[in-house]
Image (tube, grey):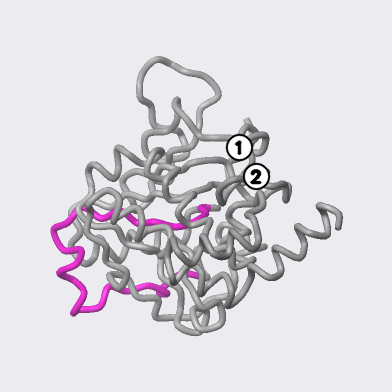
Amino acid sequence: MSVEVEGAIAKRIRSGFVNTIAVALGGAGRRVVDLVLPPRCAACGGAVTAPGLCGPCWARVDFVAPPFCQTLGTPFPYDSGEPLVSPAAISDPPDYDRARTVARYDGPARALVHALKFKDRLEMADVMAMQMIRAGAELIGDCDVVVPVPLHRRRLFSRRFNQSALLAEPIARRTGRDYAPTAITRVKGTRRQIGLSASERRRNVSGAFKVMREDRPLVEGRRVLIVDDVMTTGATVDACARVCRRAGAARVDVLTFARVVALI
């Protein structure tokens, strides 16, 4: 059997309930599945010893590292030698205080996100969360509670999991921070953001989120870290940050695995 065919079969069998059950069973469940179906690189499909990417694909990830905008976390083309805020953050300040991300949303990083989000490769969540802990160490050190961007109940029912929650939970657990998956509620179903312009994205998520009265103590007076898989224009995390501020959050930061960044 060719590597391509074997990889395709493995991906198919790993999807859906088989993979969900393996993750639910924890380490033991994953070891059983890995014994029968060795893990494959999320980007190229090659054999790997652990979930995630192979060595060559990790080498192709475009990690976001300093120098970057202290507010938006977007990279600068050169190092000025001192912390700076980008013109975009000055002209159109976000509702959050700071944002950080692991990598640009392209190549192998995009493949990791798609493996988790659209191919039911739930084992990728821990791999991605560990990278987010590294990239967001400063924000995590300053936060009191980790909050995932929520899905609307209809979207959650159809997908069966919230990828942002799968990332946020291990980040909170591994760093000893409180985890509040219900702090923000998605009260309005929205169109998928894919293909929408920046202004359309803002209108799409307007009024979509709320901190319920009973959940206010989870964020009131606290430093909140909002976690999502990908930031495109920032409309979604901005809307989440806005409702946290209205509920009395002391500060709001954002941590994502990947971000759409215009090439400079």
Q: How far is the residue under mark 2 from the one under mark 1?
A: 7 Å
Magenta segment: does it hold 64?
no
The residue drawn where x is 64% and y is 41% is 54
Q: Are marks 2 and 1 in contact (CB under 8 Å)?
A: yes
Q: Which mark is residue 58?
A: 1
Q: Is residue 145 left or right of residue 167?
A: left
Most foreground residue, 75 or 200: 75
The residue drawn where x is 45% and y is 30% is 68
Quadrant position of the C terminus in the picture: top right
Above or below for 71 versus 216 = above
The residue drawn where x is 17% and y is 56% is 222
Q: Which mark lies nearer to you, 2 or 1?
A: 1
Identify the residue under disc 2: 108
Residue 149 lies, in percent from the top left, at 40, 65
Q: Within 10 angstroms of label 2, few (less than 14), some, or many (20 or more) residues?
A: many
Q: Which mark is residue 246?
A: none
Q: Which residues are magenta?
A: 205-231
The residue drawn where x is 68% and y is 70% is 13
Above or below for 203 versus 101 = below
Number of marks in picture: 2
